[in-house]
Amino acid sequence: EVQLVESGGGLVQPGGSLKLSCAASGFTFSSYWMHWVRQAPGKGLVWVSRINTDGSSTSYADSVKGRFTISRDNAKNTLYLQMNSLRAEDTAVYYCVRGGSSSCYGWGQGTLVTVSS
Amino acid sequence: QSALTQPPSASGSPGQSVTISCTGTSSDVGGYNYVSWYQQHPGKAPKLMISEVSKRPSGVPDRFSGSKSGNTASLTVSGLQAEDEADYYCSSYAGSNIVFGGGTKLTVL
């Protein structure tokens, strides 16, 4: 069974940092592109970032470029999202998503990040 | 990176068909055959219903179908059932990124 389990969310002050993790199991993690997608409370889905299978290629939404860094450890079957200079508008549930270069397939249950003083 | 345009709401009675549109540009929907549709029930994670415009993943009922014409993609749900009531989102590849629609709340009357 494919499983994606996010962790690392929580309450952080504006300007602070947080690192999300996503533990993958039930599939060959190193064969899939991975994405982060977020959803602010009561709002729609917003794509955040993606990373290729070996971590050599990444891309970001304009809203997080220069502040967020996506990475992966294929030996640990884990995806990461380092979030710096957090703003109130970054408050959202962050989903780890298995996919291809152009699509999102399977979703984790998400982890809530709240940016507030 | 503008969001794709979806109607905020759609509705239909059990057994009826409903179609939800997703309008983008030639840089996303119109430029690639990588349109996906997701179903999200309240408090749950999204679930892939359609990929690559019209491909249905294993386990998704054949009541769900997708199509595309120009810059607009569509999701049709036939034979509406109560459990189809949910939010539906489209997404499209847009070069180096992926863009989502704003979502459509489907109500089964």
Image (cartoon, rainbow, N blue to C red):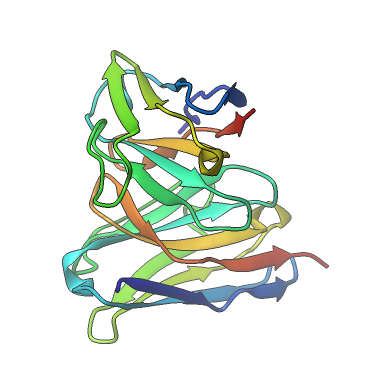
- Residue A32, quarter of the rendered image: bottom left
Q: Which residue lies at the image location 42% right of the left edge and 37% below the top edge?
A: B99
Determine whether A88 is above or below A77 in the image: above
- Residue B96, quarter of the rendered image: top left
Q: Residue furthest right?
A: A117
Q: Nearer the viewer, residue A82 or B42?
A: B42
Determine whether B15 is above or below A75 in the image: above
Q: Which residue lies at the image location 31% right of the left edge and 71% below the top edge?
A: A2
Determine whether B14 is above or below A22 in the image: above
Q: Quadrant where the N terminus of chain A lies? A: bottom left
Determine whether B85 is above or below B48 in the image: above
Q: Nearer the viewer, residue B5 or A80?
A: B5
Residue A62 seen in render: no
- Total numbered labels placed on residues in the image: 0
Residue A26 seen in render: yes
Q: Residue furthest top?
A: B70
Name the spot of residue B95 as percent of width and height, x first.
28, 36
Q: Nearer the viewer, residue B101 or A69?
A: B101
Q: Quadrant where the C terminus of chain A lies? A: bottom right
Name the spot of residue A71 as percent of width and height, x first.
35, 71
Name the spot of residue A62 as percent of width and height, x first.
48, 44
Q: Which residue lies at the image location 23% right of the left edge and 86% below the top edge?
A: A75
Q: Which residue lies at the image location 64% right of the left edge and 28% below the top edge?
A: B109
